[in-house]
Structure formats: C-alpha cells, structure tokens
Image (cartoon, grey):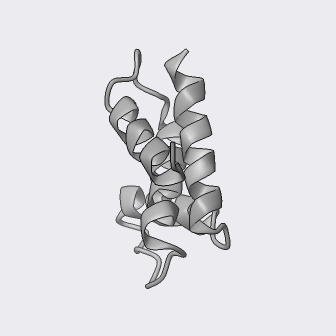
C-alpha cells in the first residue's frame, strides 16, 4: 500500500477513534495533517484574543521542517496508537 493510501486510511480512522483524544493530542493530529497536506506553516501568528487559532498555529509551527512524507508517517503512527 502506498504512503498516500495509508495516510487516507488513517484520515478515515481518525474520525472513528474509540474515544476522543485530549486537546494536546488533537493539536498534534492537526499539525501533522496540515504539514502533510500544506507543508510548512506561513502567515502571521493569530493574535492573543484568538486562543484556538494561536494554539493551532503554534502546533503546526512545531512540526515545521518535516517533509510531507515524514509528517504523513508520523500522522499514521499517531492514529494507529490511538486506535488501541
């Protein structure tokens, strides 16, 4: 199975996890997804009043520099670990 196919399978699995992950894990999932699909974060960091946007931006910035393939692998591994 190709990396892209495994990634798409993990995307589907992420919507059917046995329990909702904690907020930090959700941010990690978001960051790896964005890095996999859009590459490095760009633009300005959201202002202090947008705490959710700021947390998402910071999480995505935290994986800056990972290649799309590396981000996909990490995403797949993270979702697999949450399925158990």
Residue found at x 38% / y 55%: 52
**Residue at image coords 41%, 74%:** 47
**Quarter of the view holding residue 54:** bottom left
Where residue 70 sits, quadrant-wise, is bottom right
From the viewer's perspective, is residue 39 above or below residue 51? Answer: below
| In this rendering, position of residue 34 left or right of residue 58 | left
Depth order, front residue of 77/40: 77
- The total of numbered circles placed on residues is 0
Q: Nearer the viewer, residue 40 or 50?
A: 40
Q: Residue furthest bottom?
A: 43
Expressed as whole percent of the image width and height from the top left, the position of residue 34 reads 45, 62
* Of 34 and 49, the residue lying toward us: 34
What residue is drawn where x is 43% and y is 69%? 48
- Return the x and y of residue 21 as percentages of the image width and height: 47, 28
Q: In the displayed structure, would residue 63 be above or below residue 83?
A: below
Q: Quadrant of the C terminus?
A: top right
- In the image, residue 16 sits, relative to residue 68, either above or below, namely above
Point out residue 68 in the picture as x, y percentages from the top left corner: 56, 66
Residue ranking furthest to the front: 1
Q: Residue at x 33, y 35 (%)?
A: 12
Asked which quadrant contains residue 11, the reply is top left
In the image, residue 79 lies at what x, y percent? 52, 33
Near-viewer residue (23 or 50): 23
């Amino acid at each position: 199975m190709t990396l892209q196919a495994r990634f798409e399978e993990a995307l589907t699995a992420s919507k059917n996890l046995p329990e909702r992950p904690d907020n930090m894990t959700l941010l990690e999932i978001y960051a790896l997804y964005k890095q996999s699909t859009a590459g490095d974060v760009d633009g300005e960091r959201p202002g202090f009043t947008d705490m959710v946007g700021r947390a998402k931006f910071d999480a995505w910035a935290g994986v800056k520099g990972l290649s799309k393939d590396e981000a996909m692998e990490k995403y797949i591994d993270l979702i697999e670990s949450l399925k158990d």
